Image: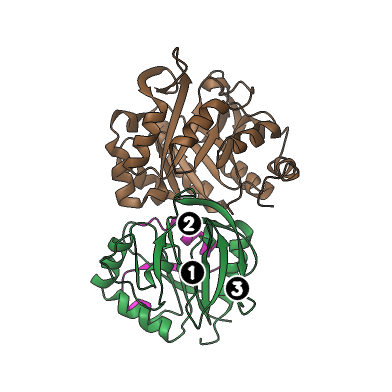
Amino acid sequence: MLTARIIPCLDVKDGRVVKGVRFQGLRDAGDPAELAERYEDQGADEIVLLDVSATPEGRAHAVRTVERVRARLGIPLTVGGGVRAVDDAARLLDSGADKVAANTAAVARPELLSEIAERFGLQCTVVAIDAARDDQGGFEVVVRSGREPTGVDAVDWARQAQARGAGEVLLTSWDRDGTREGYDLELLETLCAAVDVPVIASGGAATARDLAAALRAGASAVLAASLFHDGDLTVADLKGTLAREGLEVRR
Amino acid sequence: MTGRDVAVVRTGTSNLASVMVGLERLGARPAITRSADAVRAADRVVLPGVGAFGAALAALEADGLADALRERIDAGKPTLAICLGLQLLGAGSEETPDAAGLGVVDRFARRFPDTVTRPQLGWNRIEPDASAHLLARGYAYFANTYRFVDAPPGWSAAYADHGGRFVAALERGDVLACQFHPELSGDFGRELLARWLAGGASC
C-alpha cells in the first residue's frame, strides 16, 4: 500500500528560498539545496520547488538551482513555475527535476500537458491548480499567482488535465494559502472524487491534524512550506503523529 | 574490487540526471551511451526508462542495443534495469500491445486496476523473497502505471501491493531489475545501488 507522502515546498526567487503570505512581504528562508537535503534527512518523501521569480534573470537561476538541489537530493524533485512550453519542461528535467508542474500556461493552452506527457510520460507531468471559492458554492481556477480569475471550474479543469496526460494534481486552495487555517477539505474531497490520478493538497497547513484531515479527505500527499521553514515541526515529528493516528507513513 | 565505470543506456527522451547523480554519489563513474559495443563491453550497464514502452523499444532496436542487452543479461553480466527498463525486459506491455519486449523475462506488463490511483506515484513497502541477495525489505519510490504481477522461474523477486500484489523488483545473479526508482528512494535506494555496484561475481 502506498504511504502518505509529506512534501516540503521550496518557493524560490532568484536562487533563494523565500516565504511570505501569498508572496507578499517576502523574507529569505535559506539556500534551496541545504534545505532540500535537511528535509530529506528529516524523512521528507519528495520536494517541490516552485520558482516564483518574476524576471528572466531570476528564471535563469532556476536551472542552476535545480542542478544544485539534484546534486544533494536522493528523493523525487518536482519543479514548477514558468513552465510555458515543452522546452521549458525539457530544460528542467535535464537539470535534474523528476516531474514538472505546469499552471497558468496549461490553463491558457491545455495542449501543453499533452505535449509534456507524450514526450516524457504522464508520471513526469503535474498540473498545478490554484482554486478559489466562487459565489455559487463552486471552485474557480485562478492564475498568475492568484491575481486573475479565469471563469474555469476547477473540477472540470482537473478532469480535462487528467485526460490530457497529467499524472498528478498539485491542488492549492488560494483562500487558505498562507493562512494556517488548515486545508480546504471540501475542495479536496470534491476534486479527489473527480480524478483517478493522485492529488497533492496544498494551502493552509499548520498542524499535524490538518495533514491527517487532508489525507483522510482523499489526498495522496500533503504539501506545506512555512510550516517546515519556521522549524515549528520537523517532517519526522509530523510523521510520528500521523502514524499514531493510524496513517501509513514511511519512517 | 570491481570497476567503477557504468554505461547508462539512453533510451530516448528520458531524463537521466537523477540516475547519473545517484551513481556518482556512490563513487561510480557513469557515462551515457547509445553504442551496442559499449553495452557489450561495459563492466556494468544501467537501463533506465522513463516514457512510453513502444518508443523506448524502438530506440533500443534501432541501434542494436536490444541484442547487446539480451546477450549480457543472458550471460549474467552486472546489469540494472529501472522502472520502464524492467518492463522492457519482458515479453510486452498493455501500453503498446503491438511491440514485443526484449523477452528476457517471460512476463507481460498490465495496467494497475482502476480501484487504485494511476499512475502509482509514491513510496510503497517492498518485501523480497528469502532467496534474494541484493533486494532488502523497506520503502521504495514508484512512478508507474503498468506492472508484472508475478515473477518467472529462475528469478528472485520483491513484491509490493497496489490494488493487489505486483512485482517491485527481480534479481538473478548480478542482474537487478527494479520497478521502483532506487536513485529516488533515499537511503534505501542508495544502499541497494551500493550492493549492486559492489557485487559482480562474473567480473
Mark 3 or 1, closer to the camera: 3
Residue A59, how many percent across, how many down? 40, 34
Q: Are marks 1 and 2 in contact (CB under 8 Å)?
A: no
Q: Are marks 3 and 2 on the same chain?
A: yes
Q: Are marks 3 and 1 on the same chain?
A: yes
Mark 2 element type: helix
Question: Gap between marks 1 and 2, in whole Å?
Answer: 14 Å
Query: Does B134 appear in magenta?
Result: no
Q: Residues within 10 Å of mark 2 (few under 14, many from 20)?
A: many
The hue in which chain A appears in the rendered picture of the protein? brown
Does the image show residue A65? yes
Q: Amino acid at mark 2?
A: Ser
Q: Amino acid at mark 1?
A: Arg
User: Closest to the observer: B175 or A230?
Assistant: B175
Residue B102 versus residue A57 in the image, above or below: below
Residue B122 versus residue A140 in the image, above or below: below
